[in-house]
Amino acid sequence: MTRTILITNDDGICADGLIRLAKAAQDFGEVWVIAPDNQRSAASHSITLHSHIDVFPHDFPVAGVRAFSCSGTPADCVRICPNLMPRRPDVVLSGINHGYNVASDIQYSATAGAAFEAAFQGYHAIALSEEACGCHAVTDAFLHDILTELLDQKLGHGQILNVNFPGCPPEECGGILFDRTVSHGMIYRDHYNVIEQLPEGGLRLMVEGDYNEDAEDGTDFQAVMQGYISVGIADNIG
C-alpha cells in the first residue's frame, strides 16, 4: 500500500518551505497538507479548546496534493486529520520551518509541537527546519536523502526526529551529523524592554533577543553553527 504522508507547519499554508517539502515528499507517497491559515510560530504544542476550528479546501500549488487550511494551531492540524483523510497517515512531516528549531527553541516551536502531537497520536513524526536566511541550496540538495534515511527509522514513544539545515552555500556545508543531542543553550537570549508606561501603573513590554553562538559539543545547535545538517531525536517535554 502507498505510504500516506501528512504535512503541516507553523508558518502557514502559503509558506515556501511547506510547498517545497510537499513536492519532495511526493517521491515517497501520497501527500496531504493540513496547515494553519496564517502564521502560528511559537505556538508550541497548544491546541484549541474554547473556540471552534474552521477548515477549508485549499488550492495548493503542487499538483496531486490534497490540501486544507485550518484556523487552529499546528497541533490542531494533526489532531483533525481523521476528519479529512480517508485513513491514518503513516508519517507526519512538519516544516520546512523558516528558522532553526534547535536547543531550547524546541519547547516554543509549533513546528516541533505539531510533530510531538503526531508522535502522541502514534504517527511517525519528523520536524524539519532551516536557517531563516533565504538560502535553500543545502536543504534542497539533501532533503531527498534525509527523507529516504528517516521515513522508516524506528522511534520510541513520544519521540520525534528533528532536522535542521544550515543556510550556507552547498560547498560550505560539512554534510550530515546524526544523533545530535538537544543543546541546553539558546540562539537568542531573550529579555524584555519596557516600551511604554500605561495608565494605572501598567507596562507595555516587547521581547528582544541577543544573538548567541555558544553551543555544547555534539549538539544540534553546534552542528548548524558549524555548517552541518543536524539530525537528532527529541523527546516530548512532559
Image: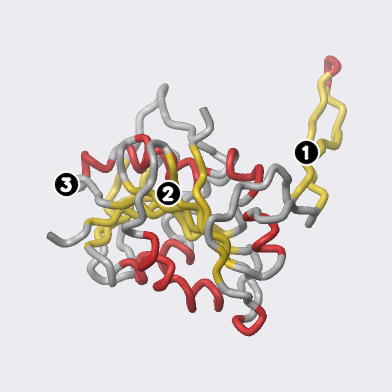
Left or right: 151 as drawn, with respect to 140: left
- SS at mark 1? strand
Q: Disc 2 residue type?
A: Asp
Circle 2/circle 1 CB separation < 8 Å: no
Q: Which percent across, then down, holds residue 183?
A: 67, 47
In this figure, what is the number of numbered marks? 3
Which of the 4 quarters of the picture holds residue 84? top left
Residue at 65%, 63% (x, y): give it.
224
Image mark for residue 130: none
Residue at 85%, 33% (x, y): give it.
196
Mark sitting earlier along the chain (3/1): 3
Quadrant containing the N terminus is bottom left
Circle 3/circle 2 CB separation < 8 Å: no
Residue at 73%, 45% (x, y): give it.
185
Mark sitting earlier along the chain (2/1): 2
Q: Which percent across, then down, holds residue 74?
A: 43, 43
Circle 3/circle 1 CB separation < 8 Å: no
Image mark for residue 87: 3
Q: Which percent across, then down, holds residue 112?
A: 50, 45
Q: Which residue is mark 1?
A: 206
Q: Nearer the viewer, mark 3 or mark 1?
A: 3
Left or right: 184 as drawn, with respect to 232: right
Residue nearest the observer in this picture, 101 or 202: 101
Residue at 53%, 32% (x, y): give it.
237
Q: Disc 3 residue type?
A: Arg
Q: Residues within 10 Å of mark 3 (few under 14, many from 20)?
A: few
Q: Which percent across, then down, holds residue 60?
A: 32, 64
Image mark for residue 37: 2
Residue nearest the observer in this picture, 37 or 98: 98
